Image: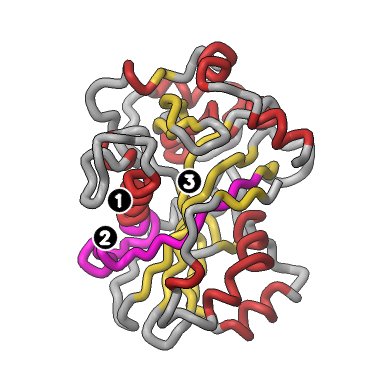
Amino acid sequence: MSDYAKLVAGLTGEDILNKWSEVTPLKQISGVPKSAGSSTDNSIINETIFEGHNEEQIKLMDELCIVLDYEDKPIGAGTKKLCHIMTNIDEGLLHRAFSVFLFNEDGKLLLQQRADEKITFPQMWTNTCCSHPLCVPDELGITAEGGSSNQNDLSTAIAGAKVAAQRKLEHELGIPYGDAPLADFQYLTRIHYKSPSGGDDSKWGEHEIDYILILKTKNDITINANYNEVKDYKYVGQDELKQMFEDDSLVFTPWFKLICQTFLFNWWGNLDDLHSFKDDKVHRLL
């Protein structure tokens, strides 16, 4: 276990709430915070840390992520801003995420290039959709199909991640819910990783337990990209993706590279039988 992993593992829920007073304890959360793009508080836009960034993306930094302990247990709600500031990450603040890998009938993977406007990891190529469940009942899984009242159950967390994934596929790529039914998402595993957004001196980064979801769809699904989120998108086969990795002019998100190096090509060769790849582990890639 790395020194950083030991740091994160040593933080109890009480430690997290004491260290980051901005995190709202789960038991104190009432109502349903608004979802993507719905912030009405313009005060965040004027903060120095956001200087030069896109206004719509700044507003999204008010969304409430699910703050976790090392064992993937929800502790409370923290803003996207709080969870992605590198100084907080370096001190061990951890949140929940998901990554969708959408394959069409031809076995091709849908990639996206993140928009220039993105505050974290702009312009980088990545998997179909990667984002965060919000700290709301359905995306915690407690009111989602297949979930339960126990937010600590893995099945409940998976159900919540699927709801979030469906929402963000529509928000980022304009994929209708009907083309991405909840029942069609296949959960495989979780990875735990940390990375700055850009160089080691970056103000922003990621530190997530990432739920991996596979989605197999028809060839003719609707895609209507939101160009504040997505600069470009394309379907690729395995050989084309490997060629892209060899192109020094292309930059990829760190989680996508980690998943490709560790898992993706094994999954890709077995899309019709992924059961053997499913586990309840958290793969620590720290």
Question: In terms of secondary structure, where does tag 3 sit?
Answer: strand
Q: Name the residue at 36% across, 41% down.
A: 153
Question: In terms of secondary structure, where does tag 2 sit?
Answer: helix
User: What amino acid is found at the position of numbered circle 2 in the picture?
Assistant: Leu
* Above or below, 177 relative to 55: below
Q: Which residue is mark 2?
A: 182
Measure the alpha-carbon separation of dots 2 and 1: 7 Å
Left of 167 or right of it: where is 188?
right
Q: Name the residue at 53% across, 37% down.
A: 71
Q: Which residue is mark 1?
A: 163
Camera-side residue: 279 or 214?
Answer: 279
Q: Which residue is mark 3?
A: 97
Residue 171 seen in the current view: no
Tell me whether the residue at label 2 lies in contact with that at label 1, contact meaning CB atoms closer than 8 angstroms: yes
Q: Is residue 190 magenta?
A: yes
Quarter assignment of residue 150: top left
Q: Name the residue at 43% across, 79% down.
A: 273
Camera-side residue: 76 or 229?
Answer: 76
